[in-house]
Every structure is written in C-alpha cells, then in structure tokens.
Image (cartoon, rainbow, N blue to C red):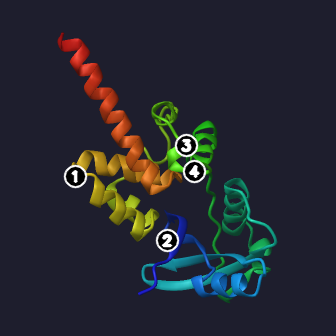
Amino acid sequence: MIKVKKIFAIKRKQYHIQLIDDVEDWEIFNSLKNREDPPIRYRIIVRREKNILAEYVRNFNVKPSSVHLTNFFKKILRNEDYRGQYLDKGNWEDIIEWDDPVNPKTKADINRLNSKPMKKLRFKDFANLKVGGRDGFSTMKEEELDATISDSDKEFIEGRLHRANLIIVAKRWAARGLQARKAVRKIKTDEEIRINFEKSRSR
C-alpha cells in the first residue's frame, strides 16, 4: 500500500479536504536518472464521507513555500472560478472560508526548524518554540489530529512517546506543520523543562 504524502487536511461542513504531495517516488528516480529536475506537483482531494467529489492538481516550476501552498489551498476552497483551472476529475461547487489556524510567528519558527537538519538544532530552539496563546489545534481531539497528519507521522509519534497526553501534544505540533521527529523532540524538551522546574521547587 502506498502511503499518501499528506501536507495537511481539514474537516469543514461535511467535507474532508486534503492537500498532498502528488509526485511518486518513481518519478523522482526517473528524473534523477535522466538528469532532469524532478516534477513539483500537488493535489487537493475533496471527500464527503468516503466518496471523492473532486480532485485538483497544480504543477509548480519551483518548490512553493508553505505560505504559497496555504494560499493555493485557500483559493481552491473559496473561489469556484479559480479552482476550475486545476480541476482534474469530479465536480465540487461549495465554498469554504478557511484561515491557517497557526499563529504567524509560530508558523515562521516551525518553518525555520524544519529547514535545518536535526543535528544543527539545539535545546533552546525547541524550548523557544511556542504556540503563542491558543490556536486552531489547541483543543483539537486526537481523532481529528489523526485525520490531519500523515499515517507515517502518527506511527512515528506513537512509537516514540508512551504517554497519551504527550502523544496528543506532539500530534498537535505535527498538525501545525512541524516534522514528526522534531515534534517528538519538542515534547521531550518541554518535559525536561517541566521536570527541572519541579525539582527546583521541591528544594
């Protein structure tokens, strides 16, 4: 079974809408073998229950930023005329108003952490990463988070954290866009801070 390379997903009204990386591994392999740039393609899938209503596909010349992808996603949801040019199959006529639920500063910090290899990140990088109050993921239930993050991220987090409360917080970070490995590291950093604080109070 091929795992979907999900970027993010939302549930609104009766719809479940996913943005996925639509490039297959064999396409990347062939492009590298032919010394060509690999394709950059994203697909938005609109479902109602288990039925696919429509799919929209867009090719990019250069790798889009997370902001660019989010704006593309918003336009597909809000604008019927805009989405028509990217329609691949099916039909969907509804309109959904949606804004990125992550605090802009938090989003920028997540992008910065994601852009660096783990070995170049330090304790303070994760300690300084904050939600910035409450956002759209702060109260999201685990089943909603599982529908938002990829299966591979879900399995990674559940395999490395063993307390339910820590697992759900890590899944919230993954849903905000933080890479799963770094979401786990964020949780472990916060736990270390909490334990050290409790020790200092008990002295």
Which quadrant does the C terminus fall into? top left
Instruction: Name the element at disc 1.
Output: loop
Q: Which mark is residue 114?
A: 4
Disc 4 is placed on an element classified as helix
- Residue 85 location in percent, x, y? 80, 80
Please report whichever mark, 4 or 1, sits nearer to the chain's N-terminal start: 4
The residue to which callout 2 is attached is: 16
Q: Earlier in the sequence, mark 3 or mark 1?
A: 3
Q: Which residue is mark 3?
A: 120
Dot 3, how many residues are within 10 Å of its Cα: few (below 14), some (14-19), or many (20+)? few
Is residue 91 at least partly visible in the picture? no
Q: In this rendering, does residue 26 appear at all?
A: yes
State the separation of the CA atoms marked 2 and 4: 26 Å
The image quadrant of residue 62 is bottom right
Say what amino acid the circle numbered 2 marks: His
Give SS at disc 3. Answer: helix
Q: Earlier in the sequence, mark 3 or mark 4?
A: 4
Q: Mark 1 = which residue?
A: 162
Q: CA distance from mark 3 to mark 1?
A: 26 Å
Label 3 to label 4: alpha-carbon separation? 11 Å
Amino acid type shown at disc 3: Lys
